[in-house]
Amino acid sequence: MNMRMVLALLVVVSVSACVPRNQPAPSDDTIVTSEVNGVTLTHRYIVQPPKEFEPVKQDYRALYPASLMSTPDFGGKVIRQLDAGKTYVVLGQVEHFWMALADEGQEELIGYVPMRAVVKSELYEKTLRQDRKRYVPPKKQTCVSVDGSGKACKNAKSGTWIID
């Protein structure tokens, strides 16, 4: 009887050693890889891989300090803000006309921004010039003399006369 208990205990101990241990959940900074449309993307765990991916791999510059998102929509987490004017690499265009970005000189996907937040590097200066408001010179002030010693001027904005 003792021999049976020893064998049963030995079997239980050996089988319990085969049970896989739970792996700790990866942190947001864990580097993972994903394959989308035949392209392998390296990214942090917090950045969700896109469903669609069309490779671009060109230098673009940020037009304004847009939020870099963890998913290609406004429902994800904000990872950081882009620096206006800084160059980034657009790895590709993803769903909803969002761009997958990497830091300049890097291959790692850092997040997503809307298409309007970045422009090709060679078009950056031209885009800024076109976006500036045009200078409109102020209208000339209309003044007339009153009794030879004073004058009255018409306010161009309101149309009222002011007597000096």
Image (cartoon, rainbow, N blue to C red):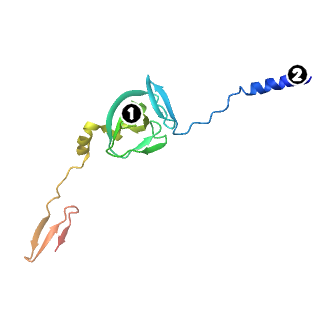
Q: Residue at x 45, y 26 (%)?
A: 40
Mark in front: 2 vs 1? 2
Q: Earlier in the sequence, mark 2 or mark 1?
A: 2
For the residues labelled 2 and 1, the Cα–Cα distance comes to 68 Å
Quarter of the picture containing the C terminus is bottom left
Q: Any mark on residue 4, and which?
A: 2
Q: Residue at x 44, y 22 (%)?
A: 38
Q: Residue at x 45, y 29 (%)?
A: 41
Is residue 164 placed above or below 64 in the rendered structure? below
Where is residue 100 drawn, in percent x and y?
40, 34
Is residue 144 placed above or below 50 in the rendered structure? below
Amino acid type shown at disc 2: Arg
Using residue 148 as the reference point, say whether residue 103 is left or right of it.
Answer: right
The residue singled out by tag 1 in the image is 97
Where is residue 104 drawn, in percent x and y?
35, 38
Where is residue 152 drawn, in percent x and y?
14, 71
Label 2, secondary structure: give it: helix
Where is residue 1 drawn, in percent x and y?
92, 22
Question: Which residue is at the front of the view, 46 or 106?
Answer: 106
Few, some or many C-alpha atoms within 10 Å of disc 2 (few <14, some 14-19, many ≥20)?
few
Quarter of the rendering containing residue 24: top right
**Are the residues tagged 2 and 1 within 8 Å (C-beta)?**
no
Label 1, secondary structure: give it: helix
Amino acid type shown at disc 1: Phe
Question: Which residue is at the front of the view, 109 or 145?
Answer: 109
